[in-house]
Image (spheres, rainbow, N blue to C red):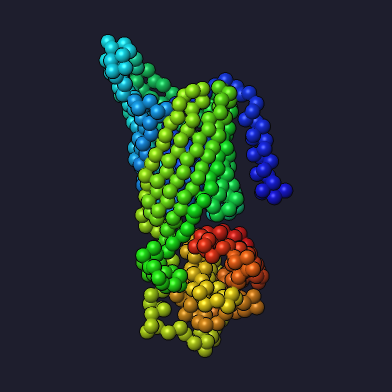
């Protein structure tokens, strides 16, 4: 049974499950979920990754973040004007680890006299402040991430109950594994330890909350997410189904280089070490089943991406006449991926001509089989253009660079300039993979071809020659020209498991 059929069966069973009556219990604790994108999908975000929003759902998800991200949020809960939420936070990769800091508040400010109710009570002020330090990284194997949150709570109010003031701490942990390029599973445990100490001397233990999530990316423009959540008092509390679809999505390497060829823009990217930027519009929706109250909560929203800037909006319809809650956030990203492609400005400058075939082959005469290292060194050769179209010639370098850039985090990669100098204008084929492994001093050589299909898409055939087995393995990806900038991650993932 393939993944599509498994996903369809899972969603069908989930939909039936949501109709059934559930146990009577509600999740508790001081934790709120200060992120807009998950709110627009019903809070299904337990297996999402590469986004700062993962902090409050599964901290392991930020382990896949590859650049600085900052977010800000404002929420008017239930549309009442006097219950608000705010959040400021950022994450930043540092080596192979991602670190994050968040400052979030829940606040109630209500004037009884202005409402004509119990004027003698005056004004109610209540504020919960949460400071969160987050850390995550890949662990042991590729695409397996572990993460944790260390939280500090500060609670102030003018209520006499509880002494009006309290403070405490909490710890969250999470794990996330990308099973395939499209399928990911995540598990998080909130408040594995923690409590709040009140001024009166009362100590309140925090409720342990768990979340199990599944994410399936059915295309480059859409994904489905399913979460279930519970706590240590009730094993199952919420069931959630959410989805996202990009109705417009475009990658650009240099938005300022209008009128230039894609190849020129790609070399501009290499020289400035800038990652492709995303422009687009995403629509989202979700449904959450509360088994304790036997209610359904519907939500919807949209996300607008304009280069490094992101604006997200979510609207949640509260059950039982609770009104609507609006969420809005503004975020931005800085920098490029943790590892960047090599700059080719020197090798491809007018004064640096490509080596001739004889110069390239002279390297072989200086090597013997004993020169091939035993460590896992990997070389990526230029891909061969079989389309016959000169406007696609830049992809000969472009595809190879994107694969190299992705694998650089996992393998000992031979510098692309060094590979280009040794190979020159020759082509690596399935029959010459072993010969080039010897010349390059590599244990693995990655090479490939790309051709155009009748429907306008590009077919990229990628090969990996392994000196340990003496075999060449192959994988294929088909993409439209508009999606070509996102091909590096998918190809690298497949190559890694060949």
Residue 326 shows in this picture: yes
Q: Residue at x 57, y 20 (%)?
A: 24
Instruction: Name the spot of residue 220 as percent of width and height, x first.
Output: 55, 54
Closest to the observer: 396 or 195?
396
Q: Residue furthest bottom?
A: 358
Residue 102 shows in this picture: no
Where does the C terminus fall, quadrant-wise?
A: bottom right
Closest to the observer: 29 or 170?
29
> In the image, is residue 380 above or below residue 106?
below
> In the image, is residue 435 above or below residue 47?
below
Q: Is residue 287 left or right of residue 127?
A: right
Splitting the image into 4 quarters, where does residue 442 fall? bottom right
> In the image, is residue 438 above or below residue 258?
below
Instruction: Name the spot of residue 159 as percent of width and height, x first.
Output: 31, 17
Splitting the image into 4 quarters, where does residue 376 fall? bottom right
Splitting the image into 4 quarters, where does residue 259 fall? bottom left
Instruction: Name the spot of residue 448 as percent of width and height, x first.
Output: 59, 71
Instruction: Name the spot of residue 321 as percent of width and height, x first.
Output: 49, 23
Give the mark count: 0
> In the image, is residue 465 above or below residue 318?
below
Q: Residue at x 65, y 78 (%)?
A: 431
Q: Residue at x 55, y 82 (%)?
A: 426
Q: Residue at x 45, y 70 (%)?
A: 262
């Amino acid at each position: 049974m393939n993944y599509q059929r498994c996903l369809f069966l899972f969603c069908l069973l989930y939909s039936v499950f949501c109709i059934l009556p559930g146990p009577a219990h509600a999740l508790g604790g001081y934790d709120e979920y200060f992120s807009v994108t998950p709110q627009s999908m019903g809070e299904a975000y337990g297996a999402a990754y590469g986004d700062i929003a993962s902090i409050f759902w599964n901290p392991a998800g930020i382990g896949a973040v590859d650049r600085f991200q900052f977010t800000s949020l404002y929420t008017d809960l239930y549309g009442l004007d006097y219950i608000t939420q705010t959040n400021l936070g950022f994450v930043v990769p540092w080596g192979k680890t991602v670190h994050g800091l968040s400052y979030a508040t829940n606040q109630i400010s209500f004037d009884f006299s202005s409402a004509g109710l119990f004027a003698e009570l005056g004004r109610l002020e209540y504020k919960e402040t949460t400071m969160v330090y987050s850390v995550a990284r890949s662990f042991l194997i590729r695409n397996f991430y572990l993460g944790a949150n260390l939280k500090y709570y500060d609670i102030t109010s003018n209520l006499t109950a509880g002494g009006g003031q309290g403070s405490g701490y909490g710890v969250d942990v999470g794990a996330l594994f990308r099973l395939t390029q499209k399928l990911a599973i995540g598990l998080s445990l909130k408040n594995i330890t923690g409590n709040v100490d009140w001024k009166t001397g009362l100590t309140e233990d925090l409720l342990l909350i768990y979340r199990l999530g599944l994410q399936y990316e059915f295309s480059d423009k859409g994904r489905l997410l399913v979460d279930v959540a519970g706590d240590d008092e009730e094993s199952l509390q919420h069931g959630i189904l959410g989805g996202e679809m990009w109705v417009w999505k475009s990658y650009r390497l240099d938005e300022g280089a209008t009128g230039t060829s894609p190849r020129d823009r790609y070399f501009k990217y290499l020289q400035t070490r800038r990652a492709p930027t995303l422009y687009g519009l995403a629509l989202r929706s979700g449904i959450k089943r509360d088994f304790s109250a036997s209610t359904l909560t519907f939500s919807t929203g949209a996300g607008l991406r304009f280069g490094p800037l992101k604006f997200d909006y979510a609207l949640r319809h509260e059950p039982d006449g609770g009104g609507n809650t609006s969420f809005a956030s503004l975020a931005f990203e800085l920098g490029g991926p943790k590892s960047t492609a090599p700059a080719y400005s020197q090798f491809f400058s007018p004064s640096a001509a490509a080596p001739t075939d004889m110069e390239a082959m002279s390297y072989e005469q200086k090597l013997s089989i004993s020169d091939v290292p035993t460590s896992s060194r990997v070389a990526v050769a230029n891909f061969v253009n079989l389309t016959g179209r000169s406007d696609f010639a830049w992809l000969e370098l472009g595809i190879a660079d994107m694969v190299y850039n992705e694998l650089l985090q996992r393998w000992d990669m031979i510098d692309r300039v060094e590979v280009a100098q040794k190979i020159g204008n020759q082509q690596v084929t399935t029959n010459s993979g072993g010969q080039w492994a010897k010349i390059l001093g590599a244990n693995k050589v990655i090479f490939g071809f790309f051709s155009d299909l009748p429907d306008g898409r590009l077919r990229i055939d990628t090969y990996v020659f392994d000196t340990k087995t003496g075999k060449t393995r192959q994988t294929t990806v088909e993409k439209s020209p508009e999606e070509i900038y996102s091909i590096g991650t998918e190809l690298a993932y497949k190559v890694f498991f060949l």
